[in-house]
Amino acid sequence: MYTTFIFDFYDVIRIDPYKKWLNDHGFDREGQFYDIAALYDRAMISFEELLEGLAQLSGETPQEVDRAFKAANNFDEDVISLIEKLSKDYKTGMLSNAGGPGLRRILNEKGIEHLFNEIIISGEVGLIKPEQKIFQLALEKLESTELEAVFIDDNLDNCKAANDLGITSIQFVGFPQLIKSMHEIGVAV
């Protein structure tokens, strides 16, 4: 019996501006582009240092990178409505690889923090997905067990890591598929 639903933020609830920027410029999230994002997600560098590093790697100015990030602010309102509905009967959490201040600002501006019992941001805890410790921390904070939890993330590696711990995971590829997958695991929404 599921009691807890844990959602990724970027590319589930809101478009991932970094992934969009990489795609728009023909870059992949590997090598230096992976390393700099991991440093930011672990809060080892500031957002300004991330912008500066990406500017150096791409040949753009930090201001151009920042503008592109800010322009990629599309939310999936269907997913937000689903979380709102789930939050009435289940524990809901967010587990995101991100810098804390930036994501907290976005959540505050959108006014959706109240939909989650717990929000775990990698930059605030020093752990990143797919490390098992961050999933264990989320379960601990949500007072749930692996068998009670469902994890929704667009990243297959993160889903596999959750599965390895015994957490049911759904790889998000779009809202219709998410609803279908939830029905398949016996959750009526």
Image (cartoon, grey):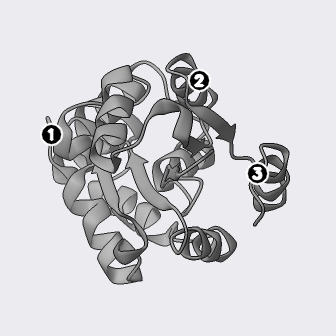
Percent coordinates x, y for residue 37 in the rendering: 34, 35
Q: Which residue is located at x 46 percent, y 48 percent?
A: 18
Q: CA distance from mark 3 to mark 2?
A: 16 Å
Q: Earlier in the sequence, mark 1 or mark 3?
A: 1
Which image quarter: residue 155? top right
Report which residue position mark 2 lands on.
Answer: 163
> Residue drawn at (48%, 22%), measured in percent from left and top?
30
Could you classify mark 1 by the number of other residues whose Cα lies within 10 Å: few (under 14), some (14-19), or many (20 or more)? some
Is residue 143 shown left or right of residue 47? right
Q: Nearer the viewer, mark 2 or mark 1?
A: 2
Q: Residues within 10 Å of mark 3 (few under 14, many from 20)?
A: some
Secondary structure state at the residue bearing disc 2 = helix
Reading the image, the residue beneath label 1 is 45
Q: CA distance from mark 1 to mark 3?
A: 37 Å
Q: Is residue 156 above or below residue 11?
A: above
Distance of mark 2 from mark 1, alpha carbons? Answer: 30 Å
Amino acid carrying mark 3 in the image: Met
Circle on res. 184: none
Q: Are marks 2 and 1 in contact (CB under 8 Å)?
A: no
Disc 2 residue crowd, few under 14, some 14–19, many 20+, Cα 10 Å: some
Question: In the image, what residue occupies the spot 53% across and 75% down?
Answer: 88
The one nearer the camera, 17 or 94, is: 94
As rendered, which of 64 and 89 lies closer to the eye? 89
Q: What kind of element bears circle 3?
A: helix
Q: Which residue is mark 3?
A: 182
Q: Amino acid at mark 1?
A: Ile
Quadrant of the snapshot with the C terminus = bottom right
Tag 2: residue type? Asn
- Residue at image location 26% in from the left, 61% down from the top: 102
Element carrying mark 1: loop
- Compared to residue 128, the image places residue 15 above or below, namely below
